Image (tube, helix red, strand yellow):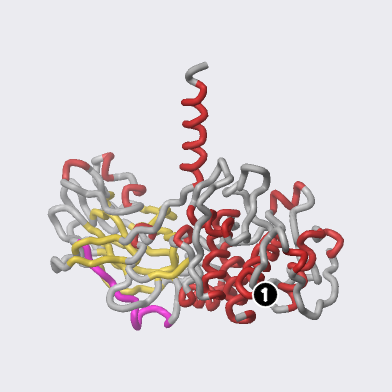
Amino acid sequence: MKKRPVFLALAVLLALALCVPALAADYTFTDRSGNTRTVKDGEYSFATRVVEFTPGDPWTDHAGSQDADAVLGQPDYEKEDTYQAMSLGAGGVLVLEFDVNIVDGEGDDIYVFEVGPAAEATRVEVSADLKTWYEVGTAQGETAGVDLHGKAPEDGRFRYVRLTDLKEYPRGDWPGADIDAILALNSKPVTNAWAENEIDRAQEYGLIPEILEGAVLTEPITRLEFAAVAVKTYEKLSGTAALPATVNPFADCADVEMLKAYNLNVAVGVGPDRFAPDELLNREQAATMLTRVFKRATMPGWSFAEDSSFPLSYVSPALFADDSQISAWARESVYFMAANGIITGMGDNRFAPSNATSAQVAARYANATREQALVIAVRMVENLS
C-alpha cells in the first residue's frame, strides 16, 4: 500500500509529460567557408523521409553506408569508420521529402552536408509534386549551399529535393557523394495552396504558436494546439499578454498555453479534471472557442460563467443545411462566425459541425486542420479588430 502514492505520482508525471510540446529550436552550423550560420527553427528543417533511392554503380560494399535513412534529420557524421552517412554510389539518385516547403530567400536556400575525405559534387533539383523538377545548382561537397533564385519559379514552394551524384569519384570503398543530411535554409510551413497567403499573414501577425512551428499544417489540429492559437489570437486582438492560471485543475495537461487559455475562460475541459489535449478539435468547437476569444477581448467583464449575459450583435445568415446537427451550445458562435466571414460552410451549404457517424470519424469529416485554425485566426484579426 505504501507504494501506491509513488505509482500515482508517476502516472501524473507521465500524463503531464505527454502534454508538454517540444519547442522549436534554432540550428547552428559551420559552413564550408568556416562561417557560423543559424537557421531559425532549423531543427524542423531537415529531410524527414526518403521517397526513392537508386544506388549508383559501383556502390559501396559497407552495409553501414547503404542505409538511405542515414541522411534524415540533423547531421551526425563524426568520422569515416562510424558509417553515419550514406553513400550515393557513382551516379546514384536520392529523392527526399521535407516537412517544410523550401522557398527562395536571402542567400542559399538548401545546404547539403556531404562528408568524408573527398569532396564529391551532386546535382540538386527541387519539386513541389514529384512530377516537375527544377535544377537549382550543384552542391560541390563538404557542406555546400545552393540558391533557388532565378532557377525555379518565383514564389515557388518545394517539398522535395533530388540529389544526383556527378561521378567525380566513381571508385574506392565509398564511390559517389557521401550524404549526411540536407537542410532547408529558407522555408515556409506546408499548407494547401488555398491557405498559403493567409498562413503567410498568420506568420506576420505572430499567430503561429511554438507548438505549431515546424508542423505540417494540413494535419488535424488538437485541442491543445488550438488553445495555443486562441491565446495568440486574443493577444493580437486585445494587445494584452495572456497570463497562465496559477492553479491547474487538469490532471492530464500542464502546458503553459493551455493554462493561459483556461485563465482567459477561452478553453475549458471535457470533464472535472481532464483537458484532453490530444483530442482532435471539430469545427463547432473551433467556432465556439474563437467566439469566446472575441468576447474576452472586446466585452469588459465577460467570463465563461456569465456568457449568457453577453449576447452577440450580428445579422444571422441563412441556416446551414445541417443546422439540426449543430449543438445548441455552439449555434450562436457558428452563425456569428459565418456572418463575419470567419468560418464558412463546407459546400452544399453544410457547416459540418461535428462527426456524427463512425464513417465521419474515420474520414475526419468535421475536424478542423491546423491551417484552417490559423486561417480563421487571421480572419478574426482582420475582420473583427
Residue 91 sits inside the magenta stretch: no
Q: Quadrant of residue 122?
A: bottom left
Residue occupying image coordinates x 25% and y 59%:
113
Residue occupying image coordinates x 52% and y 29%:
8
Residue 314 seen in the current view: yes
Q: Position of residue 348 (x, y in %)?
A: 80, 70
Q: Position of residue 359 (x, y in %)?
A: 75, 49
Residue occupying image coordinates x 32% and y 48%:
70
Residue 131 seen in the current view: no
Residue at the disc numbered 1? 342
Picture mark count: 1
Tell me if 371 is positioned left or right of 97 in this view. Answer: right
The answer to which of 380 and 300 lies nearer the viewer is 300
Q: Position of residue 116 (x, y in %)?
A: 17, 53
- Under circle 1, the secondary element is loop
Q: Quadrant of residue 292?
A: bottom right
Tell me if 319 is positioned left or right of 289 in this view. Answer: right
Residue 151 sits inside the magenta stretch: yes
Tell me if 246 is positioned left or right of 295 in this view. Answer: left
Mark 1: which amino acid? Answer: Ile
Q: Which residues are magenta?
A: 143-154
Q: Main secondary structure of the magenta part?
A: loop
**Among all residues in the image, which is located at the extreme top?**
1
Q: Quadrant of residue 299?
A: bottom right
Q: Is residue 339 above or below residue 249?
A: below
Residue occupying image coordinates x 23% and y 67%:
37
Tell me if mark 1 has few (under 14), some (14-19) or many (20+) residues whose alpha carbon lies within 10 angstroms of its own: many
Tell me if 22 is positioned left or right of 307 in this view. Answer: left
Q: Position of residue 358 (x, y in %)?
A: 76, 47
Q: Quadrant of the C terminus?
A: bottom right
